[in-house]
Amino acid sequence: MVFCRAEDGVGTKTRDGNVNSVGRASPTEWCSDPYQHEIAKVSTPLPLSAPQAILTARLTGTKPRLVPLTLALRFAAENAELRKKTWPGLELFDKFMAIIGKA
């Protein structure tokens, strides 16, 4: 999901979708080639990588760590036992919200 900003003449609205630099919704076909068109995205108000690392550490009993995207496949291959663990979605959500609430 991408949060974008759209100028409506009265104020700024945030909604799902793509918005270009002049504040108009991007045509859907631009999604197939996003590097050829300027897309303006609204930044998230809170970085989520650190809270996700904290949650993962608490759930798995490991130290918090950030894995760069370029190393994600290697990390997954080297930590196969972690890929097999599951938790109920509501439990994950509640614990994640508790961590974010302390940020």
Image (spheres, rainbow, N blue to C red):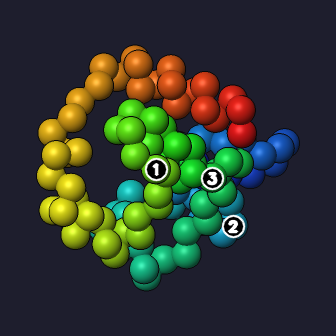
**Residue 27 in sight from this viewpoint:** no
Which of the two discs, 1 and 3, labels the residue nearer the N terminus? 3
The answer to whether 46 is drawn above or below residue 73 in the figure is above
The picture quadrant where one finds residue 19 is: bottom right
The number of numbered badges drawn on the structure is 3
Q: Secondary structure at mark 3?
A: loop
Q: Which residue is mark 2?
A: 22
Disc 3 marks a residue whose amino acid type is Pro
Q: Residue sitting at 46 percent across and 25 percent down?
A: 93
Which x, y percent locates residue 27? 44, 60
Residue in the foreground of this view, choosing between 66 and 10: 66
Q: Which residue is mark 1?
A: 63
Residue in the foreground of this view, choosing between 80 and 18: 80
Q: Residue sitting at 45 percent across and 35 percent down?
A: 58
Residue in the foreground of this view, choosing between 23 and 56: 56
Q: Which residue is mark 3?
A: 47
The CA distance from mark 1 to mark 3 is 19 Å
Which x, y percent locates residue 31? 37, 64
In the picture as drawn, the residue positioned furthest to the bottom comes out as 36
Work out which quarter of the rendered image holds the C terminus and state it. Answer: top right
